[in-house]
Image (tube, rainbow, N blue to C red):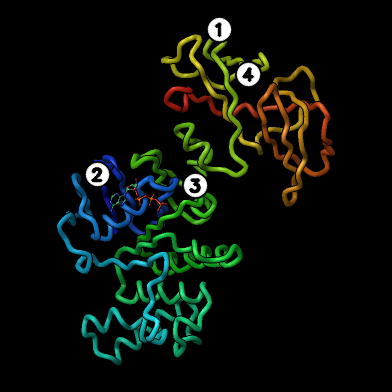
Amino acid sequence: MKIILKNISMKFDDVIAVDKLNVTMEEGSLVSLLGPSGCGKSTTLFMLAGLYQPTSGQLFFGDQLVNNIPPEKREIGMVFQNYALYPHMTVLKNIMFPLKMEKVPKKIAMEKARDMASLVHIDHLLDRKPGQLSGGQQQRVAIARALVKKPKLLLLDEPLSNLDARLRLEMREEIKRIQQATGITTIFVTHDQEEALSISDKILLMKNGRFQQFSGPQDIYDHPKNEFVAQFLGNPPINLLPATLSGDRYTVQLTETGEVIQLPYPVSKEVKLNELLLVGIRPEDLYIEVDENKQGIGGKVLIVERIGRDNLVSFLIGERKVRAIVPLDASITQGQRVKFGLHPNRFHIFRETDGENLL
Ligand code: ATP
């Protein structure tokens, strides 16, 4: 089911939790609501669930305006952060529960519950009680219960936050698998950018209740619309270096070193000559430059840390710490002076005042 939010706002007294949100989520897609604590993710999810009614704006499920439709009539399945399983009921009974509420005959309900248990790979646990299950297994039960009525929309509230690192990885792949197997439009809340980047078809990134960007993982990572988006995605985070326009609109000069960077495209016209800019370069987009005549940024190596198959090199240019991911065989040592090259298409120029990406 396609989900359309038109100018949706939600106010609690004087707090604007969600501010004029406009988004269209395609049928069958897996969308993550991402952003820092308090940005309005849960409020948005609760409006979709019908637990909150938007203060203004229109919410459509397909062609149907659902602002006034109560939760139980919305054909949604929801999984809460704490799973909210009934502790005294077996796994089978937990999964059957929504059908029981609808007075579905027991035999049919049992069949449907078994099918769902099989989909989420917990067929062997049907007689256990939630207390006898691991976190990941409990979550599978919660997902099976949310899916048993074949909802048109599945809502997941921070589904992985109670799991340890290994299980998180396993369950996020499982969520993707189950979503693809069922084809149900699925929206999940997370504050973990890596999680969002790894499984979503689209990421809706919010800040202070406001829309920032709605794009696919690759697109939002490679083409952040503003500095906040660029900073929020990526670990280690993007490097930001103060700069100004230098003469023409194809050249910026780094404030702290005076080095000049040639841009692949002109920055947009609104920028004034002395306006403060930030050059954004991701750590993986810096490479060691051996040719002294080529453009780049130089500095003194502060620390070299091994991260998996690469080294994370932190170096200082002026007072500013910059990070680069370089291959292990580059043999860079602490204290060494190095020059890093920039790929012509792999950096961003942000306006400092409003953060807008100018390239
Ligand atoms: P978190 O990641 O911490 O769960 P979130 O992105 O889900 O945060 P929301 O819970 O949607 O954020 O909250 C958005 C804003 O609205 C916050 O400033 C919060 O304090 C406020 N808020 C949320 N629910 C209520 C409420 N019931 N009454 C008053 N203010 C609320």
Q: Identify residue for label 1.
A: 247
Where on the picture, by quarter, is residue 346?
Answer: top right
Q: Crowding at label 1, few (<14), some or many (≥20) Cα neighbours within 10 Å?
A: few
**Who comes first in sequence, dot 1 or dot 2?**
2
Q: Distance between the residues labelled 4 and 3?
A: 28 Å
Q: How far apart are marks 4 and 2 (CA)?
A: 42 Å
Is residue 78 or residue 264 the one in the foreground?
78
Q: Which residue does the image show at 24% across and 44% down from the upper left?
A: 9
- At label 4, the amino acid type is Ile
**Who comes first in sequence, dot 2 or dot 3?**
2
**Who comes first in sequence, dot 4 or dot 2?**
2
Q: Identify residue for label 3.
A: 217
Q: Crowding at label 2, few (<14), some or many (≥20) Cα neighbours within 10 Å?
A: many
Q: Identify residue for label 4.
A: 261
Q: How far across and down, in percent of the image, does residue 56 sit?
A: 18, 45
Q: How far across and down, in percent of the image, does residue 338 sit?
A: 79, 27
- Per the rendering, the mark at residue 38 is none
Q: How far across and down, in percent of the image, does residue 324 sit?
A: 69, 36
Left or right, residue 283 beside residue 1:
right
- At label 3, the amino acid type is Pro
Q: How far across and down, in percent of the image, does residue 150 sit?
A: 31, 73
Q: Identify residue for label 2.
A: 9
Q: Crowding at label 4, few (<14), some or many (≥20) Cα neighbours within 10 Å?
A: many
Is residue 165 or residue 344 the one in the foreground?
165
- At label 1, the amino acid type is Gly
Mark yes or no: residue 347 visible: no
